[in-house]
């Protein structure tokens, strides 16, 4: 026996997307708790980052002036981090049958760099096909809330990693619309969640949908 689970038993890969400060990390923690209570192995991770190499690249991405990188360079750094993250963290966890919960993934590159940013959809789609291929998420929650509410929460965190948040409210609104467009284009994978409600209600919705999908898998 090798350690790898047979392909049909590859663990689910669930991503959480949305603008800055929509409450993704809280919801990921809630879902992880429920899945663990149900006896599943859960790996919680995030992008940019999620493996030692990708975390090193993250530091380059989230610190410094808003115009530190061109859209093209920024996207390449994101996908370099993502390649390492897939190889070192996500794929090995799924191969053992674990559920992977990830705070942001390639939809963020499409939303931030491809649609709201200057790179364009096609370039990001090409990078996605090359780097992610068939290893992408099986289920994606798009947490949707007004960008003003999100920026307020993100600012309140005060973690200093504010290079993206420095881009302003108009950009954040474009990002919000970009995620809605992505969800509309992939309805079999993406579920839009109204994130302007209380935390418990949102967590209940997310858990119900996740367990429905796991049951069907
Ligand atoms: P993150 O730490 O998840 O910020 P937040 O908690 O505010 O959601 O991500 C940092 C920033 O990186 C965030 O503003 C979104 C941006 N980002 C991209 O622009 N492209 C990407 O591919 C990813 C993964 C993130």
Image: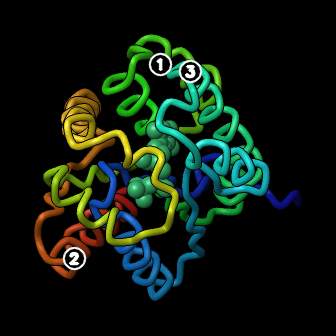
- Left-right relation of 38 to 73: left
Label drawn at residue 125: 1
Mark 1 is surrounded, within 10 Å at the Cα level, by few (under 14), some (14 to 19) or many (20 or more) other residues, namely some
| Residue 31 position (above or below residue 45) | below
* Residue of label 3: 129
Q: Which is nearer the eye, 175 or 160? A: 160
Q: Is residue 31 visible?
A: yes
Residue neighbourhood size for the residue with mark 2, other residues' Cα within 10 Å, grouped as few (<14), some (14–19), many (≥20) = some
Q: Is residue 192 above or below residue 79?
A: below
Label number found at residue 211: none
Q: Disc 2 to disc 3, how far (Cα)?
A: 33 Å
Mark 1 falls on what kind of element?
helix
- Say which label, 2 or 3, has the lower sequence index: 3
Judge by depth and name the residue closer to the eye, 88 or 197: 197
Residue at screen point 47% across, 19% down: 125
Residue 213, image x and y in percent?
A: 34, 58
Nearest to viewer (mark 2 / mark 1): 1
Name the residue that disc number 2 marks: 204
Counting residues from the start of the chain, the first of labels 2 and 1 encountered is: 1
Q: Secondary structure at mark 3?
A: helix
Q: Quadrant of the N terminus?
A: bottom right
User: Is 85 or 113 nearer to us in this picture?
Assistant: 113
Classify residue 189 as left or right of residue 101.
left
Which of 164/29 is in front?
164
Residue 34's spot in the image, x, y percent? 40, 82
Image x and y of residue 101, in percent: 50, 62
Evaluate if marks 2 and 1 touch, with contact meaning CB atoms under 8 Å apart: no
Furthest toward the top, the residue is 122
Q: Residue at x 35, y 32 (%)?
A: 111
Q: Residue 208: percent from the left, percent from the top?
A: 24, 70
Q: Quadrant of the C terminus?
A: bottom left
**Are circles 1 and 3 on residues that touch, CB within 8 Å?**
yes
């Amino acid at each position: 026996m090798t350690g790898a689970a047979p392909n049909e038993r590859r663990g689910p890969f669930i991503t959480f997307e949305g603008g800055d400060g929509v409450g993704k990390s809280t919801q990921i923690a809630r879902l992880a708790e429920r899945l663990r209570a149900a006896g599943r192995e859960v790996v919680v991770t995030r992008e940019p980052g999620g493996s030692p190499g990708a975390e090193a690249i993250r530091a380059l991405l989230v610190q410094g002036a808003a115009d530190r990188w061109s859209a093209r360079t920024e996207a390449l750094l994101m996908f370099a981090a993502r390649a390492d993250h897939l190889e070192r963290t996500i794929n090995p966890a799924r191969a053992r049958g674990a559920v992977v919960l990830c705070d942001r993934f390639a939809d963020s590159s499409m939303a931030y760099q491809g649609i709201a940013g200057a790179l364009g959809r096609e370039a990001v789609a090409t990078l996605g096909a090359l780097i992610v291929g068939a290893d992408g998420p099986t289920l994606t929650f798009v947490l949707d809330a007004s960008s003003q509410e999100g920026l307020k929460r993100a600012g309140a965190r005060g973690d200093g990693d504010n290079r993206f948040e420095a881009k302003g409210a108009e950009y954040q609104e474009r990002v919000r619309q970009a995620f809605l467009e992505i969800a509309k284009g992939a309805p079999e994978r993406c579920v839009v969640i109204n994130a302007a409600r209380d935390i418990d209600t949102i967590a209940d919705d997310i858990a119900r949908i996740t367990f429905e999908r796991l049951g069907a898998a």
